[in-house]
Amino acid sequence: MNILAPSILSIDFGHMEDELKKVVNAGADIIHVDVMDGLFVPNISFGPPVIKYVKKAIPDTKLDLHMMVKDPIRYLNTYVSLGMSDITIHAEATKHLREDLLQIKESGLGVGVAVSPDTPLSAVENVLDLIDILLIMTVYPGFGGQSFREESYDKIREAVQMRETRGLSFDIEVDGGVNAENIDKILAAGANMIVAGSAVFNGDTEANTKRLLEMMK
């Protein structure tokens, strides 16, 4: 099943509640939440207070948490308590990847692992049996609005092959530079969970969401 996860990294924070309700009313049933710490990536986004606000504004919508955070397991209990549907951590951000993923799994939430553009999929091959989501970053993490990296198509296809070879069933999520011009090719490569920020929130949010969802059918 194809899933659209609008990223609030690109939202108009001055009209956040209205914008969130627009994407939900347009048919999106999951929101992508990017948490950055200024250490793992050179930018800082937002933390628990903003996520509490999002959860209050759209309480029935799933929140897909992407932690661009060094040693992310330090914050596990905090984010579990905020009502996330899943938590994705970066392979590059911890020395104890398998143990950290197991802790997320034990919390009862969906488990995700992310890889940055320069990280080969072989770096997460030994944890694929634990995950519900493999997040392939198609831009360098830390900033919204970047262009999709063309070499990412091969990485998506490689992930599909690894999943099939192992007989696994995790979602393949793509984050970075997705728009109406490349989404068809991304889906054709094998991704089924699409993060879109600027493509959703720049312009008519509701119309953009409906257009992308229609293209994903």
Image (cartoon, rainbow, N blue to C red):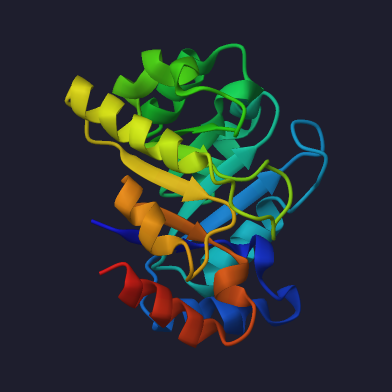
Q: Where does residue 122 sit, x and y in percent of width and height?
A: 45, 16
State the image coordinates of residue 29 (x, y, percent, origin top left): 37, 67
Is residue 103 or residue 22 the one in the foreground? 22
* Above or below: residue 203 compared with residue 108: below
In the rendered image, the residue lying farthest to the left is 167
Point out the image quarter for the C terminus: bottom left
Residue 110 visible in image: no
Q: Residue 124's spot in the image, x, y percent?
A: 45, 19
In the displayed structure image, the side of residue 177 where residue 87 appears, left or right: left
**Is 208 drawn above or below residue 173 in the view shown?**
below
Query: Residue 139, located in which quarter of the rendered image?
Result: top right
Residue 163 relative to residue 143: left or right: left
Q: Which residue is drawn at 62% across and 19% down?
A: 94
Q: On the picture, is 12 further left or further right than 34? A: right
- Given residues 162 and 81, the one toward you in this image is 162
Residue 27: x %, y % from top left: 36, 77
Name the residue: 55% across, 82% down.
205
**Which quadrant holds the N terminus?**
bottom left
**Viewer-proximal residue, 103 or 101?**
101
Q: As drawn, is 54 to the left or to the right of 126?
A: right
Seen at 42% across and 36% down, the residue is 154
